[in-house]
Amino acid sequence: LLGLTAALMLHSNRVAHVNRSAGLAHSLAALLRRARAGHGDPTATARQLIHASSSLAGSITAKRHYMKQAKAGGVPAAEYDPRFLVFEFLFDLLLRKRQVEMVEWFVDSVRVKGQSRVQQMIMGAGKTTVVGPLLTLILADGQSLVTQVMPSALLEMSRNL
């Protein structure tokens, strides 16, 4: 039952990601139609096309960075932390490589080395919406405290998450 549930979540997450990619493709197609019709500033349109095509390419080539190749009885298999899968499923997103690396680094520091860590990330990298909540989920053991520092303008949003 757990295996079927995981397979269903993997499939559902992939379908949601395909839908996001299709939305990016539709946006790019609309920009191309507008450019072909000669609407708007050519320089601004070119920048929009570059950005939209890069976003689509990034979406199409995105990977699940928490999946590790393993072997089970000589047969290729995947090894993963199911909390990453559930997090993706619940929040309808695909975790980025840097987010997974950072969460694994924090967890390893706390659980293996018994060390506290501080990390700074640029705006829009998922500190508030991904890394903080995921760390809280993984480290919620009654012994660890995940602390986030943010400007007061982000406090309410952070609390809600």
Image (cartoon, helix red, strand yellow):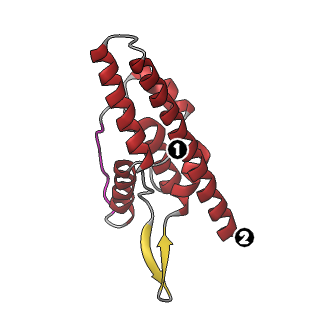
Q: The magenta stretch spans which residues? A: 114-121
Q: Residue at x 30, y 23 (%)?
A: 47
Residue 43 appears at what percent x and percent y? 27, 16
Dot 1 or dot 2: first in sequence order is: 2
Residue type at numbered disc 2: Leu
Residue 54 appears at what percent x and percent y? 35, 37
Residue type at numbered disc 1: Leu
Residue 148 appears at what percent x and percent y? 40, 38
Prevailing SS of the magenta stretch: loop
Membership of 118 in magenta stretch: yes
Q: Can you identify the residue that label 2 sits on?
A: 1
Membership of 122 in magenta stretch: no
Q: Residue at x 49, y 24 (%)?
A: 30
Identify the element where label 2 is drawn: loop
Q: Can you identify the residue that label 1 sits on?
A: 93
Residue 72 in view of the camera: yes
Q: Identify the image quadrant of the C terminus.
A: top right
Residue 141 in view of the camera: no
Position above or below: 56 against 135: above
Position above or below: 33 against 74: above
Q: Residue at x 53, y 51 (%)?
A: 137
Residue 148 placement, left or right of 17: left
Q: Which residue reaches farthest bottom?
A: 73
Q: Which residue reaches farthest front?
A: 37
Asked whether 145 or 160 is in front, the reply is 160
Identify the element where label 1 is drawn: loop
